[in-house]
Image: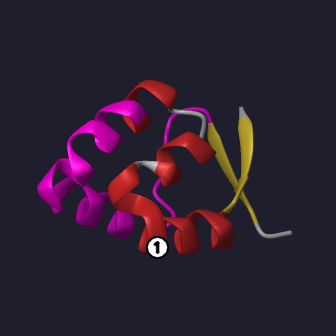
């Protein structure tokens, strides 16, 4: 399980989520590459991930930390 700073992931998702940076931070490299190539799924995937991260969704192999 990867520990991910929730605030950092949220800020990166807002600023660079269309490039897949948030997925790279969470260790989801394959999804990060797909998100990068599709520019955040034309904005739709970016918005969905932004909402999921903001609500602290339980992603596979990700544990949210606050330090």
| Residue 58 rendering spot, x and y as whole percentages | 50, 49
| Residue 34 rendering spot, x and y as whole percentages | 30, 33
* Quadrant location of the N terminus in the rendered image: top right
Please state the total of marks drawn on the protein image.
1
Q: Describe residue 54's horizontal placement relative to residue 26 as left or right.
A: left
| Residue 30 rendering spot, x and y as whole percentages | 42, 25
Looking at the rendering, the stretch of residues picked out in magenta corresponds to 33-61
| Residue 35 rendering spot, x and y as whole percentages | 31, 42
Up the image or down, 16 lies above or below 22; here it is below
Up the image or down, 60 lies above or below 58; here it is above
Residue 55 in view in this figure: no
Which residue is found at the position 39% from the left and 32% from the top? Answer: 33
Q: Residue furthest top?
A: 30
Residue 9 in view in this figure: yes
Q: Main secondary structure of the magenta part?
A: helix
Question: How are the residues colored?
Answer: secondary structure
Q: Residue 50: within the magenta?
A: yes
Q: Describe residue 5's horizontal placement relative to residue 14 as left or right.
A: right
Which residue is found at the position 34% from the left and 42% from the top? Answer: 36
């Amino acid at each position: 399980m990867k520990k991910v700073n929730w605030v950092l992931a949220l800020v990166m998702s807002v600023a660079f989520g269309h490039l897949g940076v948030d997925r790279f931070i969470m260790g989801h490299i394959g999804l990060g590459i797909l998100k990068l190539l599709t520019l955040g799924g034309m904005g739709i995937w970016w918005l969905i991930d932004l909402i999921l991260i903001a609500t602290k969704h339980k992603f596979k192999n990700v544990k949210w930390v606050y330090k």
